[in-house]
Amino acid sequence: MFARKLKVEVVVEGQRRPCPREWLDSFAMRRFSGDAAFDDTFPRADGELEAGFRVDAARLAAEMGDWLTKKKGGGKKVDVFVTEADGER
């Protein structure tokens, strides 16, 4: 089910960094979109997410960015970038 390794980075106030695992956990546990594709995600560590093939990285980044801006951004926009990890670990 979790066949892909994704790298998740956030940009807050112009600083790009790995997305904190706490944020990934919060998104994964509180995502009630009704879209089963997001059920196929598993946070591993800061900036690391495992996912199934049904998860579209661009859509995940957009949905996560919107949610993190509202819940974790402290009033500031959070941009999210999701890319294939290419075997990094």
Image (cartoon, rainbow, N blue to C red):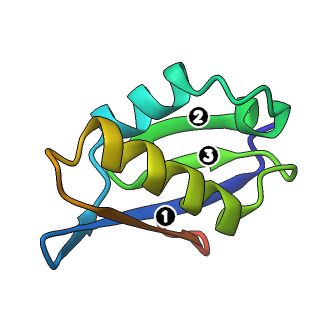
> Amino acid type of disc 3?
Glu
Asked if disc 2 and disc 1 are in contact, CB closer than 8 Å, the reply is no
Please tell me whether mark 2 sits on a helix, a strand or a loop: strand
**Residue 2 picture location, percent across and down:** 74, 41
Q: Which residue position holds label 2? A: 42
Where's residue 33, x and y in %?
70, 30
Compared with 79, 25 (above or below) is: above
Q: Specify the quadrant of the image occupied by residue 72.
A: top left
Looking at the picture, which amino acid does disc 1 mark? Lys
Q: Which residue is mark 3?
A: 50
Image point (58%, 51%), residue name: 63
Residue 71 at x, y = what percent? 30, 35
| Label 1 – label 3 distance at C-alpha | 9 Å
Picture residue at 44% right of the left edge, 43% below the top: 67
Asked if 85 appears above or below 14 in the picture, the reply is above
At mark 1, the secondary structure is strand
Q: Nearer the viewer, residue 20 or 44?
A: 20
Q: Looking at the picture, which amino acid does disc 2 mark?
A: Phe
Nearer to us in this view, 80 or 50: 80
Which label was assigned to residue 67? none
Residue 72 sits above or below residue 48 on the image:
above
Give 2 or 8, whichever is nearer the viewer: 8
Q: Is residue 72 toward the left or the right of residue 88 in the image?
A: left
Sequence-earlier tag: 1 or 3: 1
Q: Which mark is residue 7?
A: 1
Choose the circle earlier in sequence order: 2 or 1: 1
Instruction: Determine whether label 3 and label 2 are within 8 Å by CB.
Output: yes
Q: Quadrant of the C terminus?
A: bottom left
The quadrant of the picture occupied by the N terminus is: top right
Question: Pointer 3: residues within 10 angstroms few (<14), some, or many (20+)?
Answer: many
